[in-house]
Amino acid sequence: MPIAGPWIQLAVKPTAFDSDDRGTWLIFDGLLQAAGAALLIAGIATSGGDEEPALSILPSAGPHHAGLSLAGRF
């Protein structure tokens, strides 16, 4: 679960002191996910100009694959 996952895992982790630094990495991971979400929201909220955001679904094909791709301008 993005953003909340590391904090939930930290809450249910055993409270005994472990020699591994799992708690430290969970805190670091949670902070990085929160920063990424904040930057994503800030990027969406602030437009680069007078252009309207555009989203396109395009066919994608190659020698070893076929499918759809999603392209956007924000």
Image: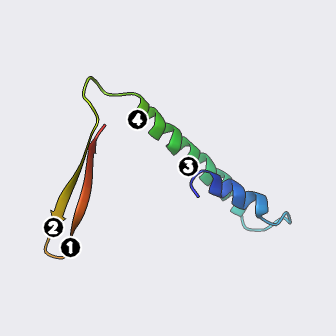
Cα distance between the residues tagged 4 and 2:
29 Å
Cα distance between the residues tagged 1 and 2:
6 Å
Residue carrying label 2 = 61
Residue carrying label 4 = 44
Q: Residue 21 appears at what percent x and percent y?
A: 71, 62
Cα distance between the residues tagged 4 and 3:
17 Å
Whichever of labels 4 and 1 marks the residue nearer the N terminus, that label is 4
Cα distance between the residues tagged 2 and 3:
33 Å
Residue carrying label 3 = 33
Whichever of labels 2 and 3 marks the residue nearer the N terminus, that label is 3
Q: Amino acid at mark 4?
A: Ile
Cα distance between the residues tagged 4 and 1:
31 Å
Q: Which mark is residue 65?
A: 1
Decide: marks 2, 3 in contact (CB < 8 A)? no
Whichever of labels 4 and 3 marks the residue nearer the N terminus, that label is 3
Badge 4 crowding class, 10 Å Cα cut-off, few under 14, some 14 to 19, many 20 or more, is: few
Residue 64 image-quadrant placement: bottom left
Residue 9 image-quadrant placement: bottom right
Whichever of labels 3 and 1 marks the residue nearer the N terminus, that label is 3
Determine whether the residue tagged by mark 1 lies in a helix, strand or loop: loop
